[in-house]
Image (cartoon, rainbow, N blue to C red):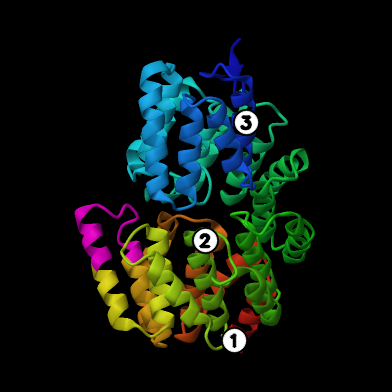
């Protein structure tokens, strides 16, 4: 009897139990919910020759920054699928292998081709999407539009109540400027499956883009207690609540959330989230003139340097630059900047020159050389999306430019930039900054 995945695609296992555990494991993985690894291991226990279960477990290991385990699992999947896999499964495993071995450009190209034939292969569709997906880290400046285009291309192949597709289609639209539509889709995804961290995340993003900070905090306060702290997005969702508190000009609440959920010693998130969330929140506090309590920067520095000792993804490099600037480590920062400049020159840093430029601008900003910060950052401001991440995460760079314009005396430019933001998403911080410009 044939077995199928949760979206109706045939899978090569003769074990109904293995198929059931696989469906559960993939859905838990796609909802960023604890238990995916247990379910996938049980699928393999019931059928050691189940290539897709090995491949999904490899994907999970890669997400959790366990490269050795990921490589071992994908190698097992490749060996098995070469013997008894269907054409879809062979392609599926090959694409996951490309993604987790750092061949991102080939993985993206192969994934898009694969989806022409099998648009309901949901694990492959998930790869280009999201703030840390293949589109976001491709170096494209228009990756927000690319995600929308991909979702709309396949929308008629998904059920109207598919909780995962609603979530990611909604997030993609919200990030691309259709915020109300995106929020509606993501909220429907959350209603279909409340145990879905990605949907809670997508809705909170849309609320942030709308300036609905109190709604975002209320959503997270209501939803987060039901999500195990071991969940990969637990600390990051708390970061969204802390960011909303800062938008309300409440630094004490932001720091309280940071201490309880976000700082490296308490977060159980993956390293990329731990570093970028901690650096960006502390930088925002400091840039806004609030004191960062003693020891917080030092703790982040110790964690970040142990996890990312060498240059890597553009998004991480920008945050490592912000961290070095905040800590007054100009010499170390310059060494890393030069290493990334060499990667730009040899084509191994897809985001390009915007990465070292942001880092140089951060050093100037930290040194209160605001005119220099503007001189460096303004010409590349349109390329900031190339670093990846979400709009909420990248706004730290816009904030730096705005504050540098204000503090360097470029009041007219600062006013124009702030007025555009206030029209799109009013916040108490922005209103306070507007008053400072007027004074």
Q: Position of residue 290 (x, y in %)?
A: 59, 86
Question: Where residue 378 appears, x then y in whole percent?
Answer: 39, 70
Tell whether position 415 is magenta: no
Based on the displayed image, in which of its 4 quarters is residue 342 positioned? Answer: bottom left
Label disc, if present, on residue 21 of the rendered structure? 3
Structural distance between the alpha carbons of marks 1 and 2: 23 Å
Viewed as shown, does residue 279 lie left or right of 227? left
Between 394 and 301, which is closer to the camera in this rendering? 301
At 61% from the left and 90% from the top, the residue drawn is: 439
Eyeballing the image, is 347 above or below 272? above
Residue located at (58% from left, 51% from top):
175
Compute the Cα span from label 2 to label 3.
28 Å
Disc number lying in front (2 or 3)? 3
Q: Where is residue 19 in the image (x, y as percent from the top left)?
A: 60, 24
Residue under label 1, please give it: 290
- Mark 2 or mark 3: name the one nearer the start of the chain: 3
State the CA–CA distance, disc 3 to disc 1: 49 Å
Secondary element under disc 1, as helix, strand or loop, is: loop
| Viewer-nearest residue: 142 or 63 | 63
């Amino acid at each position: 009897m044939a077995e199928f995945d949760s979206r109706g695609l045939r899978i090569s296992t003769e074990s109904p139990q293995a198929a059931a555990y696989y469906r559960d494991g993939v859905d838990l993985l796609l909802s960023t919910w604890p238990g995916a690894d247990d379910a996938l291991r049980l699928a393999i226990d019931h059928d050691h020759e189940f290539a897709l279960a090995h491949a999904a477990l490899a994907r999970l290991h890669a997400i959790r920054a366990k490269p050795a385990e990921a490589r071992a699992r994908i190698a097992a999947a490749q060996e098995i699928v070469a013997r008894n896999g269907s054409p879809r499964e062979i392609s599926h495993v090959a694409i996951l292998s490309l993604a987790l071995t750092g061949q991102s450009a080939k993985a993206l190209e192969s994934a898009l081709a694969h989806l022409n034939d099998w648009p309901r292969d949901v694990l492959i569709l998930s790869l280009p999407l999201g703030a840390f997906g293949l589109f976001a880290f491709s170096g494209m400046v228009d990756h927000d539009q690319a995600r929308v285009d991909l979702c709309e291309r396949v929308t008629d192949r998904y059920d109207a109540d598919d909780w995962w597709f609603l979530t990611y289609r909604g997030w993609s639209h919200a990030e691309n400027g259709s915020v109300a539509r995106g929020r509606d889709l993501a909220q429907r995804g959350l209603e279909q499956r409340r145990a879905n961290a990605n949907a809670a995340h997508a809705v909170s993003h849309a609320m942030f883009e709308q300036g609905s900070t109190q709604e975002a905090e209320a959503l997270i306060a209501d939803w987060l207690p039901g999500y195990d702290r071991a969940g990969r997005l637990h600390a990051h969702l708390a970061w969204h609540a802390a960011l909303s508190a800062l938008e309300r000009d409440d630094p004490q609440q932001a720091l309280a959330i940071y201490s309880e959920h976000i700082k490296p010693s308490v977060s159980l998130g993956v390293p990329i989230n731990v570093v970028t969330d901690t650096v960006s929140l502390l930088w925002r506090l400091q840039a806004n003139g609030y004191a960062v309590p003693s020891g917080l920067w030092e703790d982040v520095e110790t964690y970040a340097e142990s996890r990312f000792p060498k240059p890597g993804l553009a998004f991480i490099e920008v945050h490592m630059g912000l961290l070095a600037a905040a800590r007054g480590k100009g010499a170390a920062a310059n060494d890393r900047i030069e290493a990334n400049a060499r990667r730009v020159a040899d084509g191994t840093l897809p985001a390009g020159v915007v990465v070292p430029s942001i880092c140089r601008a951060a050093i100037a900003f930290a040194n209160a050389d605001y005119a220099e910060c503007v001189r460096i950052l303004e010409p590349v401001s349109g390329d900031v999306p190339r670093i990846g991440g979400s709009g909420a995460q990248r706004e730290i760079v816009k904030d730096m430019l705005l504050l540098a314009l204000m503090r360097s005396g470029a009041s007219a430019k600062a006013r124009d930039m702030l007025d555009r933001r206030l029209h799109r998403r009013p916040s108490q911080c922005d209103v306070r900054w507007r008053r400072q410009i007027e004074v």
